[in-house]
Image: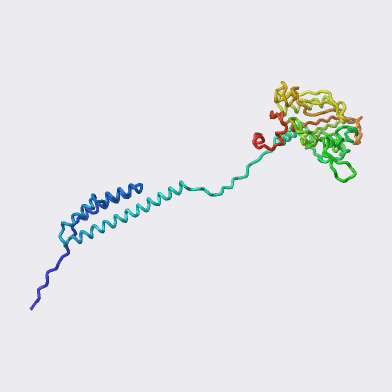
Amino acid sequence: MATEPSPTTSAPSPPFDSTELAEIESEAASRIDAAADIEALEEAERLAVGKRSRFALLYQQLRSFDPAVRKGGGQQLQELRRRLDEALERRRAALSAEERASRLLEDRLDLTEVMSSPLQGHLHVVTQVREELEDVFVGMGYEVAEGPEIESDWYNFEALNIPPDHPARSSVDTFFVDSGQAETLLLRTHTSPVQIHLLERGRLPIYAVVPGRVYRRDTPDATHLPVFHQLEGLVVDRGVSFGDLAGTIETFVPAIFGASVRSRLRPGYFPFTEPSAEFEISCAICDGSGCRTCSGTGWIELGGCGMVHPAVFEQTGVDPEEWSGFAFGFGIDRLAIMRHGIADLRLLVENDVRFLEQF
């Protein structure tokens, strides 16, 4: 006897339309992704799964379903809630990371050690003026010579026709060096000893300038320093006259100071020149009206000059009957303050960067 097959029991269809669920999920996902901060994300969560959301209304409908289909509806809603919770958690984690990164950026202390490049220095104003002077005289056909800063008494005084009782030969005016030698040594008081070295060389004629540092026991003030710089000039040739000396001074003064600065010569005395003169320029600080720098005279003495004394030629074996010449010397520091309108020599040696960086 054949047995009839038992009827097949089909599973009940899910109670919720998949299109509606997809619409709810899409709207919620859009709000979640658009949330710019945690507060906005909480609002998106309330609209997606809160008590008055479409999702909550679907949960309320489950009560009205037959027990046979209620289980399938619950699974549909649980799966949707799981996906929404995952989207909320991902967005919450992203917003938290952005907020933390922003806070760290605001509170960030840059502890990176930045090694700045070395500051670019420049030549001291006195050195700049010295090099300009050298250029001017080289352009006039002079050579630039140098000599030692520690000299013997013979080169600094004796060979220059400076008598033994001259005040400069005392320790009151000059820095003597205790070398333990029989020969008297000293820090040169002028660049004039290089005249003797050049004449001893025996190569005539001579057209030379000698820039360098010199030393004297002077109390520092607006116009004096114990250590300063001079430029010595020496010309020895046949037929050299005092007019050549005056013309040389009139040539270099406007080249350095400009045409507005005047120069003048007035009689003076130096043991190693005869005749001798002191040359001055009009004060650039007060334009000749008188000030502290020029002691109210309107003029600044730059140095001395004159025709080389025959006794100096004789000391070095040069025939004064055949050769003649002139010499001049002036302070480069004084020239610098006149050139730049600086009222006090001491500013040049105080090492104030605020002052020095102007030049």
User: From the viewer's perspective, is residue 158 above or below residue 263?
Assistant: below
Left or right of 317, for residue 299: left
Residue 196 occupies quadrant: top right
Quadrant of the snapshot with the N terminus:
bottom left
**Residue 148 image offset from top left, x and y in percent:** 82, 41
Residue 353 visible in the shown view: yes
Camera-nearest residue between 106 and 135? 106
User: From the viewer's perspective, is residue 216 above or below residue 97?
Assistant: above
Residue 184 occupies quadrant: top right
Residue 353 occupies quadrant: top right
Left or right of 337, for residue 102: left
**Residue 347 image offset from top left, x and y in percent:** 70, 33
Camera-nearest residue between 293 and 14? 293
Residue under the image location 69 percent in, 30 percent down: 342
**Residue 211 image offset from top left, x and y in percent:** 78, 36
Camera-nearest residue between 80 and 193? 80
Left or right of 131, for residue 202: right
Quadrant of the snapshot with the C terminus:
top right
Residue lying at the far left of the rendered structure: 1
**Residue 197 image offset from top left, x and y in percent:** 85, 38
Residue 34 visible in the shown view: no
Residue lying at the far bottom of the rendered structure: 1
User: From the viewer's perspective, is residue 193 above or below residue 277?
Assistant: below
